[in-house]
């Protein structure tokens, strides 16, 4: 499963991503909405159309 973590607080984003990776997920991290949109347009994430 591939997920995108969008969080402007970098330490929190990295902590969440680490937990998800421990559960076997592939995780990308971005820190703002514009970057999230860019990633979502070129990658398929769980739950995206």
Image: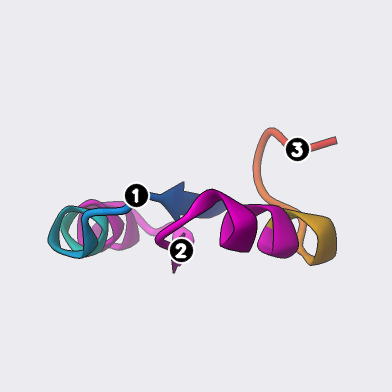
> Are the residues tagged 2 and 3 within 8 Å (C-beta)?
no
How many angstroms separate mark 2 from mark 3 (CA)?
A: 16 Å
How many angstroms separate mark 2 from mark 1 (CA)?
A: 7 Å
Residue under circle 1? Answer: 7
What SS does tag 1 mark?
loop
Q: State which tag comes first along the sequence, 2 or 3.
A: 2
Q: Nearer the viewer, residue 20 or 5?
A: 5
Residue under circle 2? Answer: 30
Labels in figure, total: 3
> Are the residues tagged 3 and 1 within 8 Å (C-beta)?
no
The range drawn in magenta is: 16-39
**Local crowd size for mark 1, using a 10 Å CA cut-off: few (<14), some (14–19), many (≥20):** some
Q: State which tag comes first along the sequence, 2 or 1.
A: 1
Mark 3 or mark 1, whichever is nearer to me: 1
Q: Is residue 5 left or right of residue 10?
A: right
* Residue for point 32% across, 62% down: 21
Q: Is residue 23 left or right of residue 44?
A: left
| Position above or below: 28 against 46 | below
Q: Nearer the viewer, residue 35 or 25?
A: 35
Query: Residue 22, position in %: x, y?
Result: 25, 60
What SS does tag 3 mark?
loop
- Point out the image quarter for the C terminus: top right
| Residue 1 visible to an observer of this rendering | no
* Residue for point 23% across, 51% down: 16
Q: Is residue 22 magenta?
A: yes
| Position above or below: 43 against 6 | below
Q: State which tag comes first along the sequence, 3 or 1.
A: 1
Residue under circle 3? Answer: 48
| Residue 27 visible to an observer of this rendering | yes
């Amino acid at each position: 499963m591939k997920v995108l973590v969008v969080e402007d607080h970098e330490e929190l984003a990295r902590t969440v991503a680490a937990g998800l990776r421990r559960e076997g997920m592939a995780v990308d991290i971005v820190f703002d909405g514009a970057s999230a949109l860019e990633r979502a347009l070129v990658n398929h994430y769980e739950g995206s159309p």
